[in-house]
Image (spheres, helix red, strand yellow):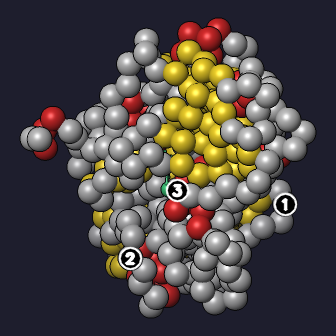
């Protein structure tokens, strides 16, 4: 097969907007500077374990089966589209976002996609609560785990506990930012597991298995589990499977940005998987003194808040630090806790700039 016939990612991802990590495309944070609250679909990061599949919605079916359904059921795209939808602003963030910094700033480099902070985005997701779709097959009270399976080549799949599957804000999504879900983001239907690492938000869903026993896949036993210092194995999983994410922030500037001396308006965003943002602080002296940034616009829980601050930039090389705190009292630490796969880098990130 020609490479052109089977691009990993279908949408254009020019180098001015994305960092190409092979199977993955990282959003360059500077592209968000003049954007509104949501990341436009064209600019949204992509994380693919195998190439974006082409799926015909006319023949697509969602298969719901397993030991805890009353009757195995096939659901069509039209059926899902006709069900009542809800729309939620939510961040989607890769668990490995920031992995590169374990090496860059903590001397513990970890293999895997070397993201800086661009494996995150906020969109307005419209979908049907998963529980309403599961109800078509009848869920028994003994249900325990729900495996969501994708139709990509690797059949990417990962189970979620029944409580998460039945939550108000766990959706089978058909629309992203007001338009039909784009192919790279899971067309025709993807899961949105609000507040959880995006690995649980399975794209191109084709099968959902509801079982009355624990379910396993490589992606909750070997990958997307926390391993190493202090994390205990949970057999057959090598460590606790990832669920919720942490609080983070980013500056809407290129890495090693070149700035003109004088008053500079710095902008960025801060986000938390566990609430809304309470405050954002800025330091240009290595964290000795911190200054409050202003929050602007919406500040939705489990999405993000835009911030800005004016900085009097003097010629030379500088390191800028931003530290976010959420309304649950979680603050970005100075160091991230190391784990073997490099997930959950939530520490304050030293962002280098040059002022001339
Ligand atoms: N079917 C399928 N779903 C998937 C993946 C995948 O490779 N295949 N990647 C997961 C991971 S690790 C992430 S971070 C998000 C990325 O979603 P996006 O590409 O829409 O940004 O999708 C998740 N869902
Ligand atoms: Mo991810």
Q: Secondary structure at mark 1?
A: loop
Indicate left or right for 76 with 279 as reference: left
Placement of 102 over or under 74, stated as above or below: below
Tag 3 or tag 1, which sits nearer the N-term?
3
Does any atom of ligand 2 lie closer than 8 Å to the CB of label 2?
A: no
Does any atom of ligand 1 lie closer than 8 Å to the CB of label 1?
A: no
Indicate left or right for 135 with 355 as reference: right
Q: Secondary structure at mark 3?
A: loop
Residue contact at pointers 1 and 3, CB within 8 angstroms: no
Does any atom of ligand 2 lie closer than 8 Å to the CB of label 3?
A: yes
**Residue appearing at x 11%, y 41% in the figure:** 1
**Residue appearing at x 84%, y 60% in the figure:** 328
Which dot, 1 or 2, sits closer to the camera? 2
Residue that numbered label 2 is attached to? 111
- Residue 108 versus residue 239: which sits nearer the camera? 239
- Residue 153 versus residue 123: which sits nearer the camera? 153
């Amino acid at each position: 097969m020609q490479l052109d016939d089977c691009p990993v990612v279908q949408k254009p991802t020019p180098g001015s907007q994305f960092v190409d990590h092979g199977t993955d495309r990282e959003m360059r944070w500077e592209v968000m500077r003049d954007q509104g609250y949501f990341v436009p679909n064209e600019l949204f990061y992509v994380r693919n374990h195998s190439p974006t599949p082409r799926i015909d919605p006319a023949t697509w079916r969602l298969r719901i089966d397993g030991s805890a359904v009353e009757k195995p059921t096939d659901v069509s795209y039209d059926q899902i589209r006709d069900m009542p939808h809800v729309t939620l602003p939510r961040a989607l963030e890769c668990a490995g976002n920031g992995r590169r910094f374990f090496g860059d700033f903590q001397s513990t480099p970890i293999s895997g996609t070397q993201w800086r902070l661009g494996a995150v985005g906020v969109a307005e997701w419209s979908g049907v609560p998963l529980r309403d779709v599961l109800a078509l097959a009848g869920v028994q009270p003994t249900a325990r785990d729900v495996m969501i399976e994708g139709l990509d080549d690797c059949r990417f799949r990962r189970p979620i506990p029944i409580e998460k599957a039945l939550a108000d804000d766990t959706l089978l999504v058909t629309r992203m930012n007001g338009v039909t879900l784009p192919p790279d983001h899971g067309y025709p239907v993807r899961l949105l597991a609000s507040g959880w690492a995006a690995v649980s938000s399975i794209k191109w869903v084709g099968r959902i298995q509801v079982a009355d026993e624990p379910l396993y896949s490589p992606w909750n036993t070997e990958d997307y589990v926390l391993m190493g210092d202090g994390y205990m194995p949970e057999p057959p999983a090598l460590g606790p499977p990832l669920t919720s994410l942490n609080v983070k922030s980013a500056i809407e500037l290129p890495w090693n940005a070149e700035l003109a001396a004088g008053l500079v308006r710095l902008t960025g965003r801060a986000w938390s998987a566990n609430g809304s943002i309470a405050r954002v602080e800025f330091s240009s002296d290595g964290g000795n003194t911190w200054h409050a940034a202003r929050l602007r616009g919406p500040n939705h829980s489990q999405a993000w808040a835009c911030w800005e601050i004016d900085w009097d930039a003097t010629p030379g090389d500088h390191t800028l630090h931003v530290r976010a705190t959420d309304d649950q009292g979680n603050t970005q630490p100075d160091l991230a806790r190391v784990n073997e796969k490099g997930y959950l880098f939530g520490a304050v990130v030293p962002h280098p700039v040059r002022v001339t």
